[in-house]
């Protein structure tokens, strides 16, 4: 009988152990290492971020995507069991696409003093620097952005030459001088977007970010929030300490388990980021990654929204020429505004160039505009 009881106890213990191991937070996922190229696009040589600053930013990414940040202790008790470790690491590339040795940093001087979120910084022909192939690199562009812009990310489905994130020089690096964003977490936030995460409020009033273990909340938070804030009938409080909110660096400190699962799903077989797993750009072996790689020229016509960010209205202007002709673009037959999830939310007919578009009724967040019949890039704006 004693042997039977002991055997049952062992089986019960094994069952409990397997049950615990099966929980996402208890598994040790295999590490993923992403090769990174940092494009430092500068106007004045005195403003070029140092190599140490670049490394500090890489260190900040590694800290937060691997749950190594000491401020995890600040996570509210109600959310401690939801903290996720992505096991995603970042390393500067050791060779360029042609196979030439590289430190993963490109310096490019430009005549442009201030960039906007119109993607110009991603094109050499427009004053920026061309992307390296997204199949092998995470592209990070660092430049002087409009003061209200801390950074932005490409969207899933964007063209290959747009793939990556853009960071304002003033908030780049894990030890920069910014009072509110000095820990490198603007880049953490934007890489989260690059890996498929939405803003935690779903870019709508009580919106859905597609993640099960983040509570709904009315909108984003800024600064450093204290105590528990309830909105949208959530019972645990807004998760304002999540990296996909907009609080100060010192007051954000976690991804959730389901956010981690979402990000890692992009590395599955045939998924968008799967090719990065090979890590070929981390081998300084002289082997070309894509010797015939060429980027198509930037589209002849570019649609730009201003002001950035917007409050009550925006206006549009076009740079370049339509279909290579010298015809002046005076307007568009149809414009469609999309939210950050790619859903059309407003259609405008017979738009006259330069006239105002009322956006006062839109929720805070990022939006995109596309003109009917035209191939346009950079048609995005931020609504405050």
Image: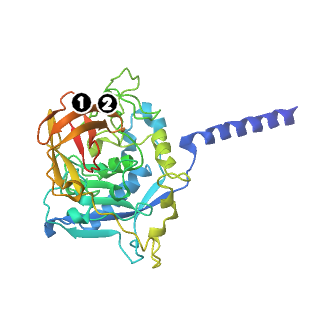
Front residue of 67/115: it is 115
Residue 68 visible, this orientation: no
The span from disc 2 to disc 1 (Cα, nearest Å) is 9 Å
First of labels 2, 1 by sequence position: 2
Q: Residues within 10 Å of mark 1 (few under 14, many from 20)?
A: some
Image quadrant in which you'd find residue 284: bottom left
Q: Which image quarter is the C terminus in? A: top left
Residue 384 sits above or below residue 380 on the image: above
- Find residue 191 and report its horizontal and vertical position in percent: 36, 51
Query: Which picture quadrant has residue 326?
Result: bottom left
At mark 2, the secondary structure is loop
Tell me what residue is drawn at x 30 percent, y 37 percent: 338
Q: Which mark is residue 133?
A: none
Q: Which residue is labeled 2 in the image?
A: 204
Where 227 falls versus 70 (above or below)?
above
Q: Give me the residue at 47% from left, 78% from top.
A: 285
Q: Is residue 247 left or right of residue 110?
A: right
The N terminus sits in image quarter: top right
Question: Is 355 left or right of 379, judged from the image as shown?
Answer: left
Query: On the rendered structure, is 165 left or right of 146?
Result: right
Residue extending furthest toward the right: 1
State whether residue 32 appears in this view: yes
Q: Secondary structure at mark 1?
A: loop
In the rendered view, would you say 257 is above or below 126? above
Between 84 and 199, the one nearer to me in the picture? 199
Q: Which mark is residue 362?
A: 1
Is residue 87 left or right of 325 when viewed as pictured?
Answer: right
Q: Residue at x 44, y 71 (%)?
A: 290
Measuring from the top left, give residue 375's x and y in whole percent.
29, 50
Q: Residue at x 19, y 35 (%)?
A: 350
How is this picture coloured? rainbow
Q: Where is residue 53, by image quadrant?
A: bottom left
């Amino acid at each position: 009988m004693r042997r039977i009881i002991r055997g049952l106890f062992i089986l019960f213990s094994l069952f409990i152990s397997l049950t615990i191991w099966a929980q996402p937070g208890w598994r040790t996922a295999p590490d993923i290492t992403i090769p990174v190229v940092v494009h430092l696009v500068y106007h004045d040589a005195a403003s070029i971020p140092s190599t140490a600053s670049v490394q500090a930013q890489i260190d900040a990414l590694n800290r937060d995507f691997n749950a190594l940040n000491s401020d995890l202790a600040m996570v509210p008790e109600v959310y401690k069991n939801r903290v996720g470790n992505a096991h995603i690491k970042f390393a500067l590339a050791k060779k360029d696409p042609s196979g030439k040795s590289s430190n993963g940093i490109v310096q490019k001087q430009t005549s442009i003093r201030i960039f906007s979120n119109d993607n110009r910084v991603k094109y050499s022909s427009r004053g920026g620097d061309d992307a390296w192939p997204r199949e092998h690199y995470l592209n990070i562009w660092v430049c002087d952005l409009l003061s209200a812009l801390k950074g932005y990310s490409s969207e899933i489905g964007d063209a290959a030459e747009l793939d990556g994130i853009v960071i304002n020089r003033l908030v780049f690096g894990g030890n920069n001088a910014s009072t509110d964003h000095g820990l490198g977490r603007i880049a953490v936030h934007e890489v989260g977007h690059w890996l498929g995460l939405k803003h935690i409020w779903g870019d709508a009033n009580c919106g859905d970010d597609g993640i099960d273990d983040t509570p709904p909340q009315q909108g984003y938070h800024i600064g450093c929030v204290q105590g528990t804030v309830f909105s949208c009938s959530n019972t645990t409080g807004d998760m304002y300490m999540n990296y996909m909110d907009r609080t100060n660096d010192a007051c954000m400190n976690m991804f959730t388990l389901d956010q981690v699962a979402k990000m890692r799903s992009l590395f599955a077989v045939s998924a968008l980021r799967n090719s990065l797993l090979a890590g070929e750009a981390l081998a300084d072996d002289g082997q070309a990654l894509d010797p015939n790689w060429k980027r198509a020229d930037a589209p002849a016509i570019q649609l730009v929204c201003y002001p950035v960010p917007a409050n009550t209205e925006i206006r549009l202007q076009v740079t370049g020429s339509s279909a290579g002709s010298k015809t002046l673009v005076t307007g568009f037959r149809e414009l469609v505004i999309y939210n950050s999830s790619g859903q059309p939310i407003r259609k405008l007919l017979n738009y006259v160039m330069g006239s105002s578009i009322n956006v006062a009724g839109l929720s805070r967040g990022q939006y995109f505009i596309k003109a009917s019949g035209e191939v346009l890039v950079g048609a995005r704006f931020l609504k405050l």
